[in-house]
């Protein structure tokens, strides 16, 4: 299972408590994990990546294993500890005020 | 006894303020969607428990929320706002072409006859319609495509379609307004559009009397006389008696004719309200005095309404969608400030009192009059 941690605003939007656990076919990538996430929680479509281009929203970042994965291509394989469920993929809202 | 429900959108959530017909004791519910910008909340005139809300965030994009129980619970519906065809370009602030990009929904206007039909005015300026309760959205692209679209440019707040008026006597007629393009009218249900800006004069654009390019801040209409429109332009309060074909200035004795909000008394089509703001660089009331101005003559002759409003050290703004009227008798007037207060008058503006004082900055105020 792939573990995903969402920011508080998206947990509220999707009525999620705690982490999300997702089953992803094959070796997981950013793209396939987000596909699975949006399939289970359709209201998250457009909240993490653009609805039409699939591009990551500018104020959203992806962290895992103490690394910033935000600028990796969507089809890049996620690190092994994320793929085997030891570490979560963190979806993070940029720390900007407002 | 009748009741009212005031729907308030703020920078950090939505609030619902409820009272009986006396409108002197209020229940406050919220924040709904805490932490998100709520640009607008509006109820269906034919099914008042059906509410639509525009929930938006620079981080997480656009959501449309729908309630079928007057705001007790909400469900996210559709948020796919795709421009029709190749979006093309409009002018950027520096005058260069800029691709049309969806940013957010500023205004939701439910149909007067069908609770599942709702219009959305968006930034970058376009008009969308849903006929399935907000699940799917389709652009009425004749507006952007009528010819002048490439010359439109954003106002300071973004290039937003902020006003949608539906003619209660003619289902084919729709008015919209865009900052900073101007006012437009469709007479065929939104398929084709024409600019209706003759008589507007705006210093600061190359041709002050151009067909498009005016920063119209708000339009208002009384449902009994839908050909008569009132406009708060960037500067100038304007009036049209021919469905926007021609406009005349009715700023009269206003102390400043800059402002955002304008509305019409529910039972007196010639009684209108504005909140004068000092200037486009100083977005606060003149002399620190928060004053609503009322005209009982459809403009030109204005009287200040001050009872119950702060008359010193007040430097808030009242945004374009942040004033509304109920249909009770006497008519109730409501407005919200960027300082987080929502003021109500239950006597057509003669006196005011705050319902709440300390909400996040208020973006929009709508009122439902309920049986």
Image: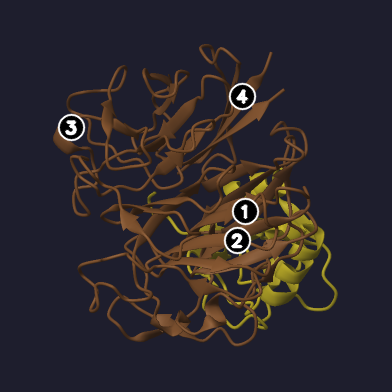
Figure chain in yellow: A
Seen at 70% across and 58% down, the residue is B171
Which quarter of the image is occupied by the N terminus of chain A?
A: bottom right
Residue B47 x, y percent position in the rendering: 77, 38
Query: Is label 1 in a helix, a strand or a loop?
Result: loop
Pointers 1 and 2 in contact (C-beta within 8 Å): yes
- Label 4 lies in what chain? B
- Label 1 lies in what chain? B
In front here: B370 or B329? B329
How dense is the environment of label 2, judged by Cα within 10 Å: few (below 14), some, or many (20 and up)?
A: some
Q: Up-down: is A23 above or below B45? A: below
Pointers 3 and 2 in contact (C-beta within 8 Å): no
**Numbered mark located on residue B4 in the image:** 4
- Marks 3 and 4, the one that precedes in the sequence: 4
Q: Quadrant of residue B141?
A: bottom right
Seen at 85% across and 74% down, the residue is A25
In front here: B29 or B255? B255
Q: Can the viewer see residue B239 in this picture?
A: yes
Residue identified by numbered label 2: B174
What whole-number distance in Å separates the C-alpha atoms at marks 4 and 2?
27 Å
Residue B175 x, y percent position in the rendering: 54, 60
What whole-number distance in Å separates the C-alpha atoms at marks 3 and 2?
37 Å
What whole-number distance in Å separates the C-alpha atoms at marks 3 and 4?
30 Å
Question: Both on one chain, marks 4 and 1?
Answer: yes
In the shown orientation, is residue B62 left or right of residue A83? Answer: left
- Marks 4 and 2, the one that precedes in the sequence: 4
How dense is the environment of label 4, judged by Cα within 10 Å: few (below 14), some, or many (20 and up)?
A: many
Seen at 20% across and 40% down, the residue is B253
Residue identified by numbered label 1: B167
What whole-number distance in Å separates the C-alpha atoms at marks 4 and 1?
23 Å
Q: Can the viewer see residue B291 in this picture?
A: no
In the shown orientation, is residue A72 left or right of residue B352? Answer: right
């Amino acid at each position: 299972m792939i573990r995903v941690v969402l920011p508080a605003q998206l947990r509220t939007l999707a009525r999620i408590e705690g982490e999300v656990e997702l089953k992803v076919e094959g070796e997981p990538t950013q793209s396939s994990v987000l596909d699975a996430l949006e399939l289970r929680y359709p209201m998250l479509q457009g909240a993490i990546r653009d609805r039409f281009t699939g591009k990551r929203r500018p104020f959203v970042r992806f962290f895992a294993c103490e690394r910033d994965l935000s600028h990796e291509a969507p089809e890049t394989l996620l690190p092994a500890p994320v793929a085997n469920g030891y570490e979560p993929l963190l979806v993070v809202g940029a720390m900007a005020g407002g | 006894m009748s009741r009212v429900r005031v729907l308030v959108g703020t920078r950090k959530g939505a609030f619902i303020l409820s009272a009986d017909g006396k409108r002197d004791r209020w229940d406050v519910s919220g924040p709904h969607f805490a932490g998100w910008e709520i640009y607008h909340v509006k109820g269906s005139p034919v099914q008042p428990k059906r509410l639509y809300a525009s929930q938006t965030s620079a981080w997480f994009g656009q959501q449309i929320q729908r309630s079928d129980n007057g705001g007790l619970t909400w469900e996210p519906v559709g948020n796919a706002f795709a421009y029709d065809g190749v979006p093309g370009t409009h002018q950027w602030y520096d005058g260069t072409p800029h691709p049309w990009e969806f940013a957010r929904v500023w205004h939701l206007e439910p149909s007067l006859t069908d609770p599942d039909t709702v219009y959305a005015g968006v930034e970058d300026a376009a008009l969308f319609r849903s006929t399935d309760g907000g699940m799917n959205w389709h652009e009425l692209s004749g507006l952007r495509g009528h010819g002048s679209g490439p010359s439109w440019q954003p106002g300071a707040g973004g290039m937003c379609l902020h006003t949608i008026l539906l003619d209660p006597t003619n289902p084919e007629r729709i008015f919209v307004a865009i900052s900073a393009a101007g006012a437009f009218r469709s007479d065929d249900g939104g398929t084709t559009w024409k600019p209706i800006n003759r008589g507007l004069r705006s210093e600061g654009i190359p041709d002050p009397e151009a067909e498009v390019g005016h920063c119209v801040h708000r339009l208002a209409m009384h449902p009994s006389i839908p050909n008569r429109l009132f406009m708060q332009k960037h500067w100038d309060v304007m009036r049209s008696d021919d469905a926007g074909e021609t406009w005349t200035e009715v700023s009269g004795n206003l102390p400043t004719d800059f402002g955002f909000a304008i509305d019409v008394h529910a039972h007196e089509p010639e009684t209108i309200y504005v909140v004068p703001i000092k200037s486009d660089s100083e977005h606060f009331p003149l002399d620190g005095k928060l004053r609503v101005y009322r005209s009982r003559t459809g403009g030109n002759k204005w009287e200040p309404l001050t009872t119950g409003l702060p008359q010193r050290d007040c430097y808030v703004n009242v945004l374009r969608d942040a004033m509304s009227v109920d249909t009770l008798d006497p008519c109730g007037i409501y407005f919200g400030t960027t300082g987080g207060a929502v003021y109500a008058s239950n006597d057509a503006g003669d006196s005011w009192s705050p319902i709440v004082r300390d909400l996040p900055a208020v973006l929009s105020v709508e009122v439902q009059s309920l049986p």
